[in-house]
Image (cartoon, grey):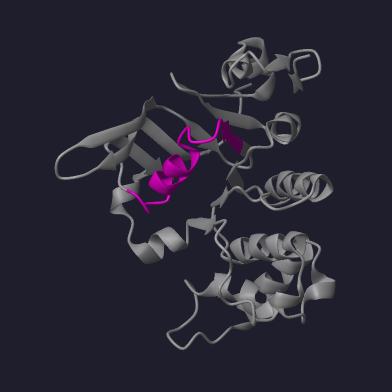
């Protein structure tokens, strides 16, 4: 009996990320070889300033790579038109929302823009997808509320619902738990775990909540000063990868509990 291998949604080959000007090139990380599989929740973690946002911007074509390749569903990322990419990959950023005067339904409906006609008319199918996205993120009771009335945690769920309504294979979130308290950090990441399982979508998020990511993710991408490594959390713990994330004078990683501890 042959083993079923999950479909690879995104793959990088010797990717190099950073910044280039007319006179110089600044490499943030190189030799990045990762695979994002269908239906998995993947956490991207690392110390502040290590390059997590740069990697996400590169994977979403906001920023050009320095070298290497990115393939999305077996196609070079460079070969996608803006419209094709919007039907394959959705992005949730940390920037403050400018259109808070919209209702929750209206904001989630923006996820259907790649599929609607030029005047943005919603079909019955569009409305069904919007309603389903609202239901999956447990915000049905907020459907007719204005976004400026929502808490940060509620608004984050709305943004996730908008990404679901976009109906892409891959959802990428840049620090989705920023500004949230501990309960809502855990709630959002637990919701993402459930959505990956229930919708079979690939969900990649960056986060400083490494302890939570270890508990909830199928795969983690860990960025250190020396390498970018991707594996299941348990394997990363066994390899001692988390011991290399921070200076050892203050914080240590406890392999037994899978969490960081402040040293006495």
Q: Residue at x 74, y 52 (%)?
A: 180
Quarter of the figure with residue 232: top right
Quarter of the figure with residue 131: bottom right
In magenta segment, residue 184: no
Say if 9 sits above or below 102 in the image: above
Q: 203 or 177: nearer the eye?
A: 177
Say if 173 sits above or below 100 in the image: above
How far across and how far down the image is residue 80, in percent?
Answer: 33, 56
Q: Residue at x 76, y 71 (%)?
A: 150
In magenta segment, residue 53: yes
Write the start and end of the magenta stretch as one range: 43-63
Whether residue 44 sits left or right of residue 252 in the image: it is left
Say if 29 sits above or below 55 in the image: above
Position of the C terminus, as image quadrant, is top right
How far across and how far down the image is residue 1, in percent?
Answer: 64, 21
Q: Residue at x 68, y 46 (%)?
A: 196
Instruction: Give the number of marks.
Output: 0
Whether residue 20 sits left or right of residue 255 in the image: it is left
């Amino acid at each position: 009996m042959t083993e079923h291998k999950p479909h690879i949604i995104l793959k990088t080959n010797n990717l190099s990320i950073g910044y280039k000007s007319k006179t110089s090139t600044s490499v943030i990380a190189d030799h990045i070889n990762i695979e994002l599989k269908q239906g998995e929740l993947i956490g991207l973690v690392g110390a502040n300033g290590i390059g997590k946002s740069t990697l996400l911007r590169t994977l979403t074509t906001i920023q050009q790579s320095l070298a290497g390749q990115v393939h999305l569903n077996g196609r070079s990322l460079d070969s996608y038109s803006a419209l094709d990419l919007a039907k394959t990959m959705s992005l949730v950023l940390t920037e403050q929302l400018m259109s808070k005067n919209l209702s929750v339904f209206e904001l989630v409906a923006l996820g259907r823009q790649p599929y609607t006609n030029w005047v943005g008319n919603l079909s019955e199918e569009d409305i069904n997808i919007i309603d389903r996205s609202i239901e999956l993120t447990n915000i049905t009771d907020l459907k007719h509320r204005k976004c400026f009335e929502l808490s940060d945690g509620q608004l984050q769920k709305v943004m996730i619902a908008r990404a679901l309504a976009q109906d892409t294979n891959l959802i990428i979130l840049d620090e989705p738990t920023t500004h949230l308290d501990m309960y809502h950090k855990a709630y959002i990441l637990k919701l993402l775990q459930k959505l990956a399982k229930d919708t079979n979508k690939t969900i990649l998020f960056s986060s400083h909540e490494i302890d939570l990511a270890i508990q909830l993710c199928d795969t983690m991408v860990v960025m250190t000063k020396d390498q970018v490594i991707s594996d299941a959390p348990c394997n990363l713990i066994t390899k001692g990868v988390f011991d290399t994330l921070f200076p050892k004078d203050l914080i240590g990683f406890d392999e037994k509990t899978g969490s960081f501890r402040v040293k006495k």
